[in-house]
Image (cartoon, helix red, strand yellow):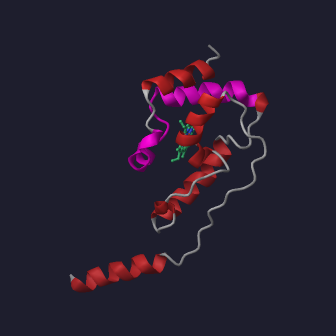
Amino acid sequence: MKKFLIAVVVILIGIQFIPVERTNPPVISDIDAPADVKAILKKACYDCHSNETNWAWYTKVAPSSFLAVKDVNDTRKNLNFSEWNINKEAKYKEEIWDEIREEQMPPWQYKIFHSEAKLTPEEKNLLRNWATNK
Ligand code: HEC
C-alpha cells in the first residue's frame, strides 16, 4: 500500500512536467452585443468561447490542465466570441439560446468552480431576448 501511494505521488509530480500550452490568441473581431448581454457572456462563457481565457488554477495543475487546455482549444473552434462572424450571427444566436434553455451551457463541471457562471432567471431572460431578437 505504501509503495503504491508513493508511486501515485511520483506520477502526479512527474506529469506536472509535461508541457501544455495555455494560449490567448489575439482578439480578431469581438462580438458586438449590448453591454448587459456582453457582461453575462464574459463571465459565463468567455473562459472557453473566446481568446480572452482567464486560466483558472486547476488549468495549471496536471492532469486537469490537459483536459482544460484541450477543451478550450476545441471550444474556440466551435464558437468563438473573439472571432465573431457576423454572417453567422443568426445561427449562433439560435444555438446559444438552445444550449442555455436546455441548461447545457455553461457546463456543470465549470459551475462547480465558477458560481458566477450560474445564470439567474433574469440573466437567462436577457440572453433569450437578445438571442431571439425580442
Ligand atoms: C468550461 C468551458 C465552457 C464554458 C464556460 C461554456 N462552454 Fe459552450 N461549449 C463548451 C464545449 C466543450 C462545447 C462543445 C460541447 C459538445 O460539442 O458537446 C461547447 C459548445 C457550445 C455551443 C455549440 C453547440 C453545438 O452544437 O455546436 C454553444 C452554442 C455554446 N457552447 C454556448 C455557450 C454559452 C452561451 C456559454 C456561456 C453561457 C458557454 N457555452 C459556456 C465549453 C464551454
> 6 left or right of 125?
left
In front here: 16 or 91?
Answer: 16
Residue 37, x across and y down, in percent: 60, 29
Residue visible at 72% across and 56% down in the picture: 25
Q: Residue at x 57, y 59 (%)?
A: 69
Q: Is residue 52 above or below residue 97?
A: below
Residue 63 x, y percent position in the rendering: 45, 67
Measuring from the top left, give residue 126's x and y in whole percent. 55, 23
Q: Quadrant of ligand 1?
A: top right
- Give the extent of the magenta segment: 88-117
Residue 115 or 104: which is nearer the viewer?
A: 115
**Residue at the spot x=40%, y=76% of the render?**
12
Q: Specify whether residue 114 is painted magenta.
A: yes
Q: How many marks?
A: 0
In this rendering, is residue 70 above or below 132? Answer: below
User: As drawn, is 23 to the left or to the right of 114?
Assistant: right
Indicate left or right for 92 with 110 as reference: right
Residue furthest to the top in view is 134
The C terminus, quarter of image: top right
Q: Residue furthest front?
A: 35
Q: Quadrant of the N terminus?
A: bottom left
- The one nearer the camera, 34 or 128, is 34
Residue 6 in magenta? no
Direction left: furthest residue:
1
Q: Main secondary structure of the magenta part?
A: helix
Determine whether 6 is above or below 133 in the image: below
Residue at position x 68%, y 26% from top?
91
